[in-house]
Image (tube, helix red, strand yellow):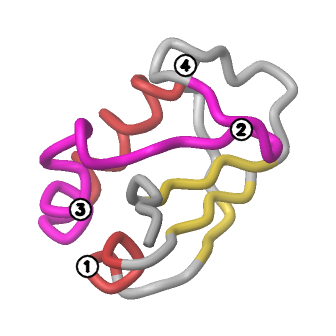
Amino acid sequence: MQVLYFAWLRERIGIPKEQVETSAATVADLVAELRLREERYALAFSDMAAVKVAVDQEIVDLNAPLAGVREVAFFPPMTGG
């Protein structure tokens, strides 16, 4: 699946997107796998309260299933102004 990183997540991880092969059943499982990759991922995903997730362009929570998913995007919460 394609995994996209936005804003400070992209800055911490160092890439805007990547193709990920995973056996993760949920978004939370995917985050756990990514955290174990390298320190930069662990840092980016250290505070999931500060991260929003979209699966195939729909906002979801960490328990969302990944079966059949083509794209997962991680980004900080939006603020208005």
Mark 3 or 2, nearer chain start: 3
Residue 44's disc number: 3
Residue 39 picture quarter: bottom left
Q: Residue at x 55, y 81 (%)?
A: 16
Q: Which residue is mark 1?
A: 12
Residue 42, located in which quarter of the rendered image? bottom left
Task: Please give the range of residues in magenta.
Answer: 38-60
Is the Cβ of the residue at disc 1 closer than 8 Å to that at disc 3? yes
Residue 35, given in percent of the width and then of the height, sits at 25, 48
Amino acid type at circle 3 is: Ala
Left or right side of 38 for 32 = right
Pointer 2: residues within 10 angstroms few (<14), some, or many (20+)? some
Mark 3 and mark 4 lie on one chain; the one further toward the N terminus is: 4
- At numbered mark 2, what does the secondary structure look like: helix, strand or loop? strand
> Which amino acid type is marked by label 4?
Thr
Amino acid residing under circle 2? Val
Please tell me which of labels 2 and 1 falls first in the chain. Answer: 1
Provide residue 67's location: percent of width, then percent of height: 78, 19
Q: Nearer the viewer, mark 2 or mark 4?
A: 2
Which quadrant would the C terminus be assigned to in this image? bottom left
Crowdedness near tag 1: few (<14), some (14–19) or many (≥20) residues, C-alpha within 10 Å: some
Question: Looking at the picture, which amino acid does disc 1 mark?
Answer: Arg
> Residue shown at 15%/44% (left/top)?
47
The residue nearer to you, when weighing 60 against 28, is 60
In the picture, measured across the screen, residue 43 lies left or right of residue 66, that is left
Which label's residue is closer to the chain start, 4 or 1? 1
* Label placed on residue 55: 2
Q: Residue at x 82, y 42 (%)?
A: 56
Q: Where's residue 18, x and y in %?
A: 62, 70
Q: Secondary structure at mark 4?
A: loop
Q: Which residue is mark 4?
A: 26
Q: Is residue 27 magenta?
A: no
